[in-house]
Amino acid sequence: MNDQMTTHQAEEDARNEDIKIFVNGQVVPKADAKISVYDSGFMLGDGVWEGLRLYDGKWAFVDEHLERLFEAAKAIDLGIGMDRGEIFAALEETRTANGIKNDAHARLMVTRGVKVRPFQHPSLSRSGPSVVIIVEHSRPSLPRPIRLATVPHIRGLPMSQDAKLNSHSKLNCVLACIAAEKAGADEALMLDVHGFVNTTNACNFFIVRNGEVWTSTGDYCMNGITRRKVIELCRANEIPVFERNFSLVDTYGADEAFLTGTFGAQTPVSEIDGRAIGDGKMGPVTGQLRQLYKDMILTEVS
Ligand SMILES: Cc1ncc(COP(=O)(O)O)c(C=O)c1O
């Protein structure tokens, strides 16, 4: 385990050095895209974000992404200061300013904005939110299936920091990823408070056993849009799918495992804690779901 890679690995693209970025109403060159050191996102991780993908000139599942963004903003009592139409227009303005028509990834970020003093209280952010949109040229490129390591960092109860918030503060996940790297894996497999297998540090997690697709109950993980689409695809194609508790024993003994996320769609897993999953290659159900998802995207963007 030494050739390090991540689930968000893309082909090198020199054009990304010269992109333009949306910062608070203006689309500016990357070198000028700056946020104050007093910004609550920088100081405290006090903000929410979405990752979106562009296929054939269209943002896939954009309504779901904007719905989740506005739901998260409401939950953290953050007024975005723009409605959904305006956010979408800003996303499109950023895309067109960069002349991008295909294969792009957007990171759309909203924080509580600049503080008047360098302290935690949210009332110190008085000049409105900060809205930043990065649209990069992006073609996922995974040379091999992903290796996971189970880590001591868990997905906690929703009354501490609800895993359904796509918050800027991802320290729990970052620490999980560091622990996985130190164990020689690519990313972390995280358990829930009861010790059931839950999610990875940046993606949702599925296993396949005897032709059945299993994922966690959803209580402790991000309500991933790709996760939901995979469940829908299973139901529509008579692939048995279960949102249920399962353990590491079930996981090590699975025939296949894969991750889901907007960036990588369905990413096969070869190894968990040094145990090969199946034959260590992408399995047939993962392959079938990847194809079904590709077809779904084609319908979505046509
Ligand atoms: C922790 C975590 N899990 C899962 C996901 C995947 O969600 P989606 O499929 O909506 O991209 C994300 C994406 O932001 C995430 O941050």
Image (spheres, rainbow, N blue to C red):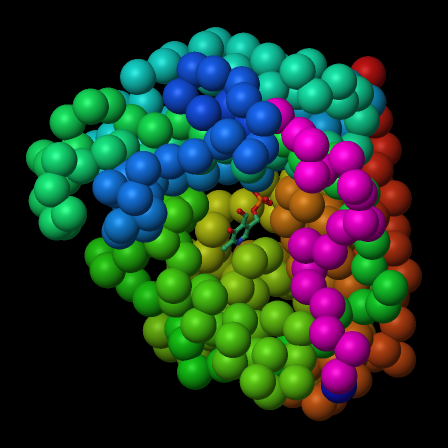
As for residue 4 lying within the magenta part, the answer is: yes
Q: Decide if residue 72 is in sight here.
A: no
Q: Residue at x 22, y 57 (%)?
A: 159
Q: Is residue 130 left or right of residue 133?
A: left
* Quarter holding residue 62: top right
Where does the image place residue 147, in percent across and percent down from the top left? 72, 76
- In the image, residue 224 above or below residue 302: below
Magenta stretch prevailing secondary structure: loop
As for residue 211 lying within the magenta part, the answer is: no
Q: Nearer the viewer, residue 232 or 187?
A: 187
Q: Is residue 257 left or right of residue 215?
A: right
- In the image, residue 62 above or below residue 157: above
- In the image, residue 91 above or below residue 75: above
Image quarter hosting the N terminus: bottom right
Range shown magenta: 2-20
Q: Residue at x 66, y 30 (%)?
A: 19
- In the image, residue 90 above or below residue 218: above
Q: Is residue 1 left or right of residue 157?
A: right
Q: Residue at x 33, y 47 (%)?
A: 42
